[in-house]
């Protein structure tokens, strides 16, 4: 047990030590300063902008940034739909995987477009190599870069001056891909190749097992896919079993590297803000708030998994390794529990164990991480979500102590507050409304033909659930929480590949991705255009531990008010029944 705990502590500390200089590097990249990658990528970027006739030096206001962002995403969505609906006749399909159905292609294209990677298909049998590389892996790069570019716009807007010129979106986007994502992914992919992860375009291989059985083993360009899946906080697995698959995550070393890779950029983006906007103390306050929230979720999960199921203990059966149901022996209960909270807190969605088999406390904390959705969060977008809570805290704190509600020398007024409240409340609305509709159909055993038909032809809505009662409700709540948080993980006790789940979660994915980007960028743009007011005696200071505590309290209160009733019907009720 203790070596396992030491392992995750070492990874956490190592991530922090790497994130600070990486944040400084990212700030230089977005600030246009000279960095070591210039000699490699400057010629490539200049050629790209020359061919596309894009002026990377033209400054944009916040509205122009959003127009470009949304237009590019529309084009990428159409391309992904084309690939998934026609992959059977497109090249690079040695295993002859069929086309996706329209509803599944809709869900998959949107899911990878919005950095969620909610996979309602099985990776190795659901898509061809062409779709894996040129649709899904392409989207993993550009969706991550989109979130980072949007964060760069907000960084620019929060500098101490008055302007409506907030850089160039194309420039931020391309540099996010070439200067940040690509170099890190190359290193991560090389580690996996040397540890045994496949990197080939050959099809299924036939092998003989130790027992003498003939086995058909899928392979492909896995190492490259795994790298961007974690570095870009995407989470979609090349194989259906994701990072529990021995070819996708061969051993403890690759498991630790994947943990580091998925947490690194969410850490670094916070510090990048501090270096870019010259607000380093404030960046540490933000990181501290996020870390306290993360630890409050991960510690109970570790305790619950190490303790195991109390009902098994009452039967006189020892669980020396803790709750090992649904977990890989090569990782153990500790690393799996830490992974489950890390991957839901940072909105990656990658899994190395079956979340459906975790203890109720762990399942609840996974959902809470996604419900708050700003304890680190996804790359780029996690900072944008946190920014919304900062605006709310500034306004509330100003009212409480009689100070001017200002952030970064700019007054927070009614317009900014309205946008912030809409974004803060829209997240629980999507989760709770979706869960309510799904629960209604399940409770009344509704049969609506094709709407509920799964791959096996079953039409019964109650057939979605592999678990009854409280745990079954948690499966549905988790699915919409994961969709709204752009996470992508699932309890996987849910039969979700049918038109109802594909279409409904696809709608949630769209709204939950773009509104939380549009809102913070709009607020930052509005603040950037206001007159800069130097800090005075009447200003509410935001770079203090007191303000950090206020931000944390705002997060907790909003999450509790919005989600406690739903959690009480799922994991909390399950925990109480288990311990009665």
Image (tube, rainbow, N blue to C red):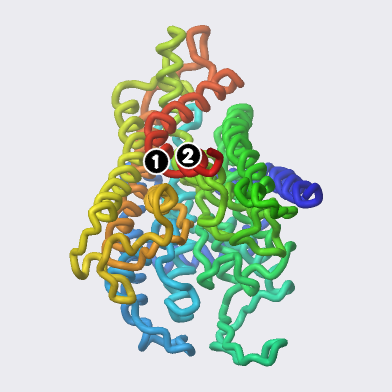
Q: Position of residue 393 (x, y in %)?
A: 45, 23
Q: Is residue 456 above or below residue 470?
A: below
The residue at the far front in this view is 315
Residue drawn at (42%, 37%) of the image: 568
Q: CA distance from mark 2 to mark 1?
A: 7 Å
Say which quarter of the image contains residue 93. bottom left
Count of labels in the image: 2
Q: Tag on residue 572?
A: 2
Q: Are marks 2 and 1 in contact (CB under 8 Å)?
A: yes
Q: Is residue 71 above or below residue 573?
A: below
Q: Position of residue 290 (x, y in %)?
A: 57, 35
Residue drawn at (38%, 65%) of the image: 495
**Mark 2 crowd level (few <14, some 14–19, many ≥20, 10 Å Cα):** many
Q: Nearer the viewer, residue 467 or 231?
A: 467
Residue drawn at (40%, 31%) of the image: 528
Q: Is residue 513 above or below residue 89?
A: above
**Mark 1 crowd level (few <14, some 14–19, many ≥20, 10 Å Cα):** some
Q: Position of residue 437 (x, y in %)?
A: 26, 49
Say which quarter of the image contains residue 304. top right
Residue drawn at (51%, 63%) of the image: 45
Q: Secondary structure at mark 1?
A: helix
Q: Tag on residue 569?
A: 1
Q: Nearer the viewer, residue 23 or 60?
A: 23
Answer with left or right where residue 268 lies relative to residue 168. right
Q: Position of residue 463 (x, y in %)?
A: 33, 64
């Amino acid at each position: 047990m203790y070596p396992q705990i030491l392992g995750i502590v070492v990874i956490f500390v190592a991530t922090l030590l790497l994130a600070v200089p990486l944040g400084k590097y990212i700030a230089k990249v977005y600030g246009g300063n000279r960095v070591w990658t210039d000699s490699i990528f400057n010629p490539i970027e200049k050629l790209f902008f020359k061919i596309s006739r894009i002026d990377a030096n033209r400054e944009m206001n916040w509205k122009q940034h959003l127009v470009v962002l949304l237009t590019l995403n529309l084009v990428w969505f159409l391309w992904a739909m084309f690939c998934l609906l026609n992959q059977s006749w497109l090249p690079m399909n040695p295993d002859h995987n069929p086309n996706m159905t329209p509803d599944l292609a809709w869900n998959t294209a949107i899911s990878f477009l919005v950095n969620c990677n909610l996979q309602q298909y099985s990776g190795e049998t659901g898509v061809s190599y062409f779709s894996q590389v040129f649709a899904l892996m392409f989207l993993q790069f550009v969706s991550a870069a989109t979130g980072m570019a949007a964060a760069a716009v907000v960084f620019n807007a929060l500098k101490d001056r008055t302007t409506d010129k907030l850089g160039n979106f194309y420039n931020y986007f391309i540099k996010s891909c070439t200067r940040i994502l690509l170099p890190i992914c190359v290193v991560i992919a090389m580690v996996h190749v040397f540890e045994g992860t496949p990197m080939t375009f050959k099809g299924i291989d036939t092998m003989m097992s130790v027992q003498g059985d003939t086995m058909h083993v899928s392979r492909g360009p896995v190492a490259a896919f795994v790298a961007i899946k974690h570095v870009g906080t995407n989470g979609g697995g090349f194989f259906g079993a994701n990072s529990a698959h021995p070819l996708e995550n061969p051993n403890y070393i690759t498991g630790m590297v994947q943990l580091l890779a998925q947490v690194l950029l969410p850490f670094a983006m916070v510090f990048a803000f501090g270096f870019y906007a010259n607000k380093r103390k404030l960046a540490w306050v933000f990181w501290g708030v996020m870390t306290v929230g993360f630890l409050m979720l991960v510690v109970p999960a570790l305790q619950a998994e190490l303790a195991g199921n109390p009902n098994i203990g009452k039967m006189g059966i020892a669980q020396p390794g803790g709750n090992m149901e649904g977990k890989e022996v090569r990782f153990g209960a500790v690393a799996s529990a830490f992974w489950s909270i890390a991957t839901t807190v940072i909105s990656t969605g990658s899994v190395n164990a079956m979340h459906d088999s975790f203890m109720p406390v762990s399942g609840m904390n996974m959902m809470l991480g996604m419900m708050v959705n700003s304890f680190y969060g996804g790359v780029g977008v996690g900072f944008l979500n946190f920014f919304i809570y900062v605006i709310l805290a500034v306004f509330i704190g100003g009212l409480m102590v009689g100070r001017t509600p200002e952030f970064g020398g700019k007054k927070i007024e009614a317009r900014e507050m309205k946008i912030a409240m809409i974004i803060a409340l829209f997240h629980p609305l999507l989760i709770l409304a979706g869960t309510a509709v799904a629960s209604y159909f399940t409770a009344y055993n509704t049969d609506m033909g094709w709407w509920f038909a799964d791959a096996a032809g079953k039409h019964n809505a109650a057939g979605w659930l592999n678990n009854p009662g409280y745990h079954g409700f948690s499966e549905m709540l988790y699915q919409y929480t994961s969709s709204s948080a752009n996470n992508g993980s699932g309890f996987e006790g849910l039969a979700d590949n049918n038109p109802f789940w594909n279409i409904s979660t696809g709608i949630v994915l769209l709204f939950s991705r773009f509104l939380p980007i549009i809102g913070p960028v709009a607020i930052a743009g509005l603040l950037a255009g206001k007159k800069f007011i130097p800090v005075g005696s009447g200003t509410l200071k935001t770079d203090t531990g007191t303000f950090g505590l206020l931000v944390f309290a705002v997060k907790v209160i909003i999450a509790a008010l919005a989600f406690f009733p739903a959690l009480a019907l799922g994991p909390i009720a399950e925990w109480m029944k288990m311990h009665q």
